Amino acid sequence: GLIGRSWAMLFASAGFRVKLFDIEPRQVTDALVSLRKEMKMLELSGYLKGQLGAEEQLSLISGCSDLREAVEGALHVQECVPENLELKRKLFAQLDKIADDHVVLSSSSSCLLPSKLFAGLAHVKQCLVAHPVNPPYYVPLVELVPHPETAPATVDRTYALMRRVGQSPVRLLREVDGFALNRLQYAVIAEAWRLVEEGVVSPGDLDLVMSDGLGLRYAFIGPLETMHLNAEGMLSYCDRYSEGMKRVLKTFGPVPEFSGATAEKVHQAMCVKVPDDAEHLAARRAWRDGCLMRLAQLKRQLPQ
């Protein structure tokens, strides 16, 4: 799928040899065709990552029909199967039987806890979650989430690898449901939903609050640095604004159901802007990805 193809492109951009495996051979064949098309397009537009050209990077990526052959000699395995706990556990049990004592076994899971994913594996010290943000080729963040028994060296190696392929890894010191990114994302989504549901703001204007307000700021600095800069440092901010923040936070409502009349209202508003047929959605995603590419390029050019 998209996540697996994106990982392949990222690893190849840094000069690593990549093997793609899927239980459905057609998936691998289709992925190789898709990768060629996308990487050629990126090269033409000037957004291909790495020092190698598209053909050189493509030559590093191959398909494989046997799992043992796919992981033989690998230094890192990145699992990208659908977000289903039993399916992922089954795959990692297979990998556990054929992995050596050096390869890192990593999952792309967005919210499944490592303690459940890797429970009972002989190579658990070599296991962790490396959760990318969709689409990974354009959004560099990767959350590294260890199992309680993951060796520190496994996290260190994966951190170094992610940096080498141009990503921005962050280390979670312990596992938590939703990790960091989705906990923040769900908090925003929940309050956005409540504001629309309670008739405070329209769906379209709600999205503008983020895209033309908070989102512009947060594209360059996070919420904690924002606090630090919006006063004479963090302690000054807390002293000035903590009472107001606590007052507002106490008015937040319960977890929304994300269904019923509000879901229909939001759906209709979104479809006015982007109809929900495959063609319009694909075009809008392509526009989004182009914006993300240009933003990422801008951020690389700016001093930190």
Image (tube, rainbow, N blue to C red):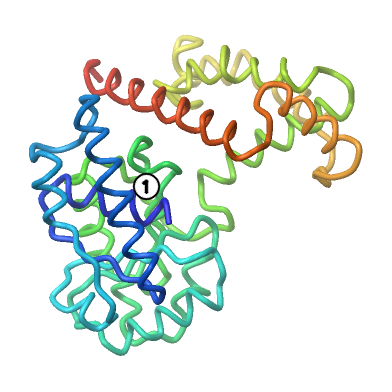
Query: x, y percentage for residue 65?
Result: 28, 77
Of 209 and 8, nearer the camera is: 8
Can you identify the residue that label 1 sits on? 142
Location of residue 43 by image quarter: top left
Question: How packed is label 1: few (under 14 Cα within 10 Å), some, or many (20 or more)?
Answer: many
Q: In this view, does 261 lie to the left or right of 59?
A: right
Q: In this view, does 36 lie to the left or right of 92?
A: left
Location of residue 128 by image quarter: bottom left
Query: x, y percentage for residue 85?
Result: 56, 72
Of 67 and 207, nearer the camera is: 67
**Residue at 64% in and 42% down:** 186
Query: x, y percentage for residue 297?
Result: 27, 22
Local secondary structure at mark 1:
strand
Looking at the picture, does residue 240 appear above or below residue 135?
Answer: above
**Residue at 60% in and 40% down:** 278
Quadrant holding the C terminus: top left
Q: In this view, does 218 lie to the left or right of 193?
A: left
**Residue at 68% in and 21% down:** 273
Residue type at numbered disc 1: Val
